[in-house]
Image (spheres, rainbow, N blue to C red):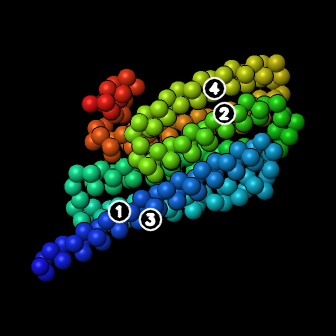
Amino acid sequence: MENKSLNKHISGQFNAELEDIRNRVLAMGGLVERQLEESLDALASLDAELAQKVIDGDHRVNGMEVSIDEECTRIIAKRQPAASDLRLIITIGKTITDLERIGDACVRIAKAALDKRLNNQQPLLVSIENMGRHATRTLHATLDALARMDADNALELHKEDAKLDKEYEGIIRQLMTYMMEDPRSIPAVLDVLWAARAVERVGDRCKNICEYIIFFVKGKDVRHTSYEDMEKDLNM
């Protein structure tokens, strides 16, 4: 009886540890989502104070990545988890890396908002604002799929990256035209281009997280796999 009680206690502690890191990665996701929203707001309104707030807040995202990663390592060493528990820890470990990189993208967007050369270039920011809102919705939905470990939803969200890529290509064409028509605009346009690239990278990171969700649910690595093949794997 004592052994059964001890095993139950250990199992209970382990489950609590897994739940804790799940909650922490979702909290990190919430912080990153807020950073993205605020960086885009700062760029749209060229709000230097808000942009600086995003830049200063990046250390919190970095700190969360480090602490969650350390906890994942500790759990693996102490508990030696198997099967789905190990997949969960691997999924979380990979996800926090992508969330941290989304945080870096937010800093890149915020830094563009500090460029005073954009004060007279407001038309340049309209397209990137629309693309940014698309990226924000995608990130929010991806975090929701992560919270529920919803592989079907993750598969659907996986397609959003291709849509964001097309929007990015459209913005590049628009900015190239703008530079050719007015060479004096080139320094400002390049800042917008870097910010647009940062938004496009958010889509890439969301796509990665969707693949990790599918990995957790199905136990299959679907990176570098076509959408059709992923769909087959989910339906098996």
Of tags 1 and 3, the one toward the viewer is 1
Q: Do the residues labelled 2 and 4 touch (CB within 8 Å)?
A: yes
Q: Residues within 10 Å of mark 4 (few under 14, many from 20)?
A: some
Which numbered disc flags the more N-terminal residue, 1 or 3? 1
Name above or below for residue 4 compared with residue 83.
below
* Residue 184 horizontal side relative to residue 108, left or right: right
Instruction: Tell me the mark number nearer the camera, choosing from 1 and 2.
Output: 1
Give the label on residue 18, or none: 1
Cα separation between marks 2 and 4: 7 Å
Q: Decide if residue 182 is in sight here.
A: yes
Residue 210, quarter of the rendered image: top left
Real-space Cα distance between discs 2 and 3? Answer: 32 Å
Q: 92 or 46: which is nearer to us?
A: 92
Residue type marked 4: Glu
Cα–Cα gap, marks 3 and 4: 35 Å
**Tag 3's secondary structure?**
helix
Percent from the top left, x then y, of residue 44? 77, 42
Quadrant in which the C terminus appears: top left
Callout 1 amino acid: Leu
Which of 19/191 is in front? Answer: 19
Secondary structure found at label 1: helix
Query: Whole-Å distance between the Cαs marked 1 and 3?
Result: 14 Å
**Residue sitting at x 36%, y 28%:** 231
Q: Mark 2 points at which residue?
A: 131
> Percent x, y for residue 99?
51, 50
- Residue linked to disc 3: 67
Front-most of residues 95 and 159: 159
SS state under label 4: helix
Tell whether label 2 touches label 1 (CB within 8 Å): no
Quadrant showing the N terminus: bottom left
Residue 167's mark? 4
Report the Cα–Cα distance between label 1 and label 2.
35 Å
